[in-house]
Image: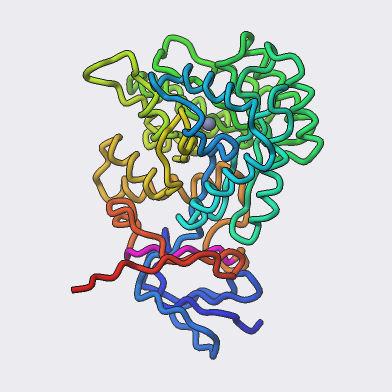
Amino acid sequence: MPLDLVLEGAVIAGRDGPACDIGVADGRIAAIEPRIDADVPREPLGGRLVIPGFVETHIHLDKSCILDRCKSEHGSLEEAISEVAAAKHAFTEDDVYRRGQRTLEKAIVQGTTRMRTHVEIDPRIGLRSFNAIRRLKQDYAWAIDLEICVFPQEGLTNDPGAEELLIEACEAGADLIGGCPYTDTAPNEQIARIFSIAGRFDLDIDFHLDFDLDPSWMHLGEVCRQTELRRWGGRVAIGHVTKLSAVDGEGLALIGRRLASAGVAVTVLPATDLFLMGRGHDHSIPRGVAPAHRLVDHGVTCSLATNNVLNPFTPFGDCSLIRMANLYANVARLGRPRDMVQCLDMVTRLPAKLMNLADYGIAVGNPADLVVLDCADGVSAVAELAAPLFGLKHGRRSFTRPPAILHR
Ligand SMILES: [Zn+2]
């Protein structure tokens, strides 16, 4: 097949050996060779690192960019939930679309090519946010694959009408279903019902789970139990799990092995967890970030993700996943080269595994989703927050960020 483009002198993330050329044809990776001689447009990379794009497993596009209408006085989880619940009444489909668009475009120019967004469904918001995000999914397919996870943020069994709406969203094409047992009056019943809906529609599951610093009780065990009972291993993820930051090494090893054998993956959300956890302390403040790198060592599939952007859950955010990898490395005090590479893995390869993306990766035959970072290897990508310079989605250029120029 004739090539359309050659990326010349690329260092491919996760692959040993010298820089090579990547040939793109018809939106796919057609060749990876030391030198490709073809009379087609060429993009010299000068030994820069190429990744298949960042993979965001956990973000909330629908409630991003609402600091103009919410307050964040205490910075607690309870305040964030109640502030957003109040603001949600006034969300219109166009409003959600415009705010989601702003956040999605930021993620695209940060080099994210695949994304799972959570979308709240309940009787107050109905399917307005869901419909807006579905439009975004279609309108931005040229730059990013967007997966929609519908979930009841304010509870399921305690919120009459929420379950019917969730089912309606699944019938309308939601990609997967989530849960939030910690806001439910009957958490285990919620977990069971979410598994039942997932079974009925053949969907993966992604829970918000165990989001405080008390390790004396957890919903994690019940999620593992249901995953095994229903043979849903490899299709279940849990996010936050900040309780794991308060568990000692021995306890963590037990839990890690349990998660790995059940096939339950974990997403850690460093920005939100650092912002919301440990609010009762005025000194020696616990970090509240689950040790994802240790879980990976126990065989758990882990990702680092953004979660919230510019709202009371997290009043920050530029949607950069290399920033999340760097932030996590910083908080978890990971400084060895192999640790930094693992942090890069947790925003690329491992989240792709969490999302069961079979066609992700720089390999012949896969979609030509290629993002060039302004660095020579994975260690400096994480240590220096390497800037994404440009990206291709399905072989077509989707964004460009020219490098900075010094004017001496
Ligand atoms: Zn979340």
Q: Between residues 242 and 98, which one lies in front from this camera angle?
A: 98
Q: Is residue 198 left or right of residue 356?
A: right
Is residue 220 in sight in this rendering? no
In this picture, which residue range is highlighted in magenta? 368-375
Q: Residue at x 62, y 57 (%)?
A: 359
Of 112 and 329, the residue lying toward us: 112
Q: Is residue 180 above or below residue 348?
A: above
Q: Say which residue appears at 31% left-offset and 67% top-offset.
A: 404
Residue 140 at x, y percent in the picture: 64, 56
Q: Magenta span has 369?
A: yes
| Residue 163 image-quadrant placement | top right
Q: Position of residue 19 (x, y in %)?
A: 38, 73
Q: Which quadrant is the C terminus positioned in?
A: bottom left
Which quadrant holds residue 287? top left
Q: Residue furthest bottom?
A: 39
In this view, the residue farthest toward the left is 408
x%, y% of residue 399?
A: 51, 64
Q: Is residue 18 visible?
A: yes
